[in-house]
Amino acid sequence: MKIGVIAMQGAFREHEQTLARLGVETLRIRRSEQLSQVDGVIIPGGESTTIGKLLGDFNLMEPLREKILKGLPVFGTCAGMILLAKEIENSNQPRIGTMDIKVARNAFGRQVDSFEIDLVIPEVGQEPVRAVFIRAPYILEVKPNVQILAKVEDKIVMARQENMLVSAFHPELTDDLRIHRYFIEKVCKGL
């Protein structure tokens, strides 16, 4: 198995390191032709408007959207979640727009409002997951075909729709491999 990590901006190195710890080969995606060489893609956290602009500038936006709509597994963290959302509150920024969710950007506040919390995510195990939120978005609305995987109070912070997985937090910034393992074993392998 080989997972592509969109390497335009943001925390792509941390995702590569996490995948390496799981024994998964990675490929830094910067060109559309690389998409045919991977079994799944991770869109990292970072600045969603910048990543969206770069995806357009490098002619990756449309090919990536087409591949995802045809079933390519994708995992978007933080900014990646924003880019995958069909709707972004008060924004018309460029986006991939394949997932039936509406998100709010920087919804938990500014950089100084970043926080960590233990989240129970039954899909990955009974032991809580340490979740790191940095200028994090959250999901405001989901369509019925979207499975909610985790919430912080009443705010949706992790969800799945078929081949698409999103989290408002950064699992790549902890030593816990369970969320990446879930992406590989359940989303990519379709189990």
Image (cartoon, rainbow, N blue to C red):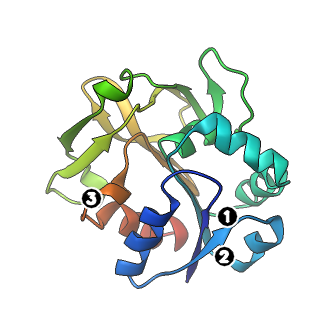
Bin the neighbour count of mark 2 within 10 Å (Cα to Cα): few under 14, some 14-19, many 20 and up. some
- Seen from the viewer's position, the closer of residues 119 and 110 is 110
Residue 35 vs 119, above or below: the answer is below
Q: Mark 1 points at which residue?
A: 72
Q: Quadrant of the N terminus?
A: bottom right
The kind of residue tagged 1 is Leu
Residue at left 65%, top 55%? 8
Q: Is residue 95 left or right of residue 190?
A: right
Three-letter amino acid code at disc 2? Val
- Residue at image point 40% right, 85% down: 23
**Which tag, 1 or 3, sits closer to the chain's start?**
1
Sequence-first tag of 3 and 2? 2
Mark 2 — residue? 38
Q: Tell me the tag on residue 174.
A: 3
Q: Residue at x 70, y 38 (%)?
A: 97
* Label of residue 150 in the image: none
Q: Cα distance, mark 3 to mark 2?
A: 24 Å
Q: Residue 139: x, y in percent?
A: 47, 29
Q: Specify the farthest residue to the top.
A: 90
Q: Do the residues labelled 2 and 1 touch (CB within 8 Å)?
A: yes
* In-image side of 153 versus 186 (left or right): left
Residue 85 seen by the camera: no
Q: Residue 155's image quarter?
A: top left
Image side of residue 21 versus residue 159, left or right: left
Q: Is residue 144 above or below residue 177?
A: above
Query: Amino acid under label 3?
Result: Thr
Q: Quadrant of residue 82?
A: top right
- 15 lies left or right of 151: right
| Residue 48 appears in the rendering | yes
Q: Where is residue 39 in the image (x, y as percent from the top left)?
A: 62, 75
Q: Where is residue 159 in the image (x, y as percent from the top left)?
A: 44, 43
Q: Mark 3 touching mark 2, by CB under 8 A?
A: no
